Amino acid sequence: MELEIEGKYIFLRKKVVSKLDLFVIDFIKILERYTDYVIVSGYVSILFGRSRGTEDIDIFIEKIDFKKFKQLNDELRKRKYWFLNSENPLELYGMLNDKLAIRAAIQDTVIPNIEIKFTKNRIDRDSLQKHMEVKIDRDSINISPLEIQIPFKLYLGNDKDIEDAVYLYELFGEHLNKEKLKQYMDILKVQGSNYGIEF
């Protein structure tokens, strides 16, 4: 796999596209017709070649009204997806408004699934509004800025998340905006020096 970065765009060339990648790409092609989105957390490092499993793909979306959510719900069901939380779109929308996640998967499966949340704080909104775009052939995937992703994984703090943060830092080190990285590390009150994440 070859990486090339131009501004907010990351071009992935000679990438072996996995079944998980295809699952994500298919889902977001539907999702982006109804709302802006950004993928955060574990799948980001997997997308760039880190070898580890995941059960869910975490996505923040811009808040939409119920009418638009119902349209999204209906199209997903036509395309053979289902929501693990409820069959009632009004209940699902209520969960989103209550700052809870809803999960979608391909019918008759549970894993992998997409975990969807409305943005709820500055980090979420910055991730969405300042997202990067990963280009894979003719497809593209919006991910949170690496300068947010790395501190966020450190903030989560378990071994797998810290390993994700270190992996991304080592992979993209020379391309990172260290000032922005420090800014978000300060916001989240995390330190990276113990893991080789330094400025």
Image: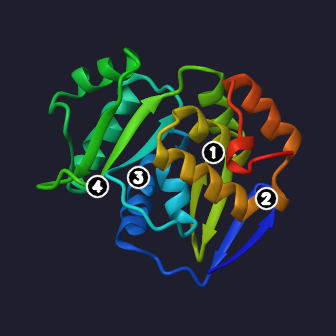
* Residue located 42% across and 62% down the image: 52
Residue at mark 3 to residue at mark 2: CA–CA distance: 33 Å
Residue 61 placement, left or right of 132: left
Residue at mark 4 to residue at mark 3: CA–CA distance: 17 Å
Do the numbered discs 1 and 4 sit on residues whose CB atoms are within 8 Å?
A: no
Name above or below for residue 7 compared with residue 2: above
Mark 3 nearby-residue class (10 Å; few <14, some 14–19, many ≥20)? some
Do the numbered discs 3 and 2 sit on residues whose CB atoms are within 8 Å?
A: no
Residue 32 in view, yes or no: no
Residue 24 placement, left or right of 146: left
Residue of label 2:
173
Mark 1 nearby-residue class (10 Å; few <14, some 14–19, many ≥20)? many
* Residue located 79% across and 58% down the image: 173
Residue of label 3:
30
Q: Which of marks 3 and 2 is nearer the N terminus?
A: 3
Mark 2 nearby-residue class (10 Å; few <14, some 14–19, many ≥20)? some
Residue at mark 1 to residue at mark 2: CA–CA distance: 16 Å
Q: Nearer the viewer, mark 3 or mark 1?
A: 1
- State the residue in front, 161 or 49: 161
Residue of label 4:
112
Residue 106 in view, yes or no: yes
Residue of label 1:
144
Q: Earlier in the sequence, mark 4 or mark 3?
A: 3
Q: Quadrant of the image for the C terminus? A: top right
Three-letter code, disc 2: Gly
Classify mark 1: helix, strand or loop. loop
Q: Quadrant of residue 116 in the image?
A: top left
Three-letter code, disc 3: Ile
Classify mark 3: helix, strand or loop. helix
* Residue located 75% across and 42% down the image: 193
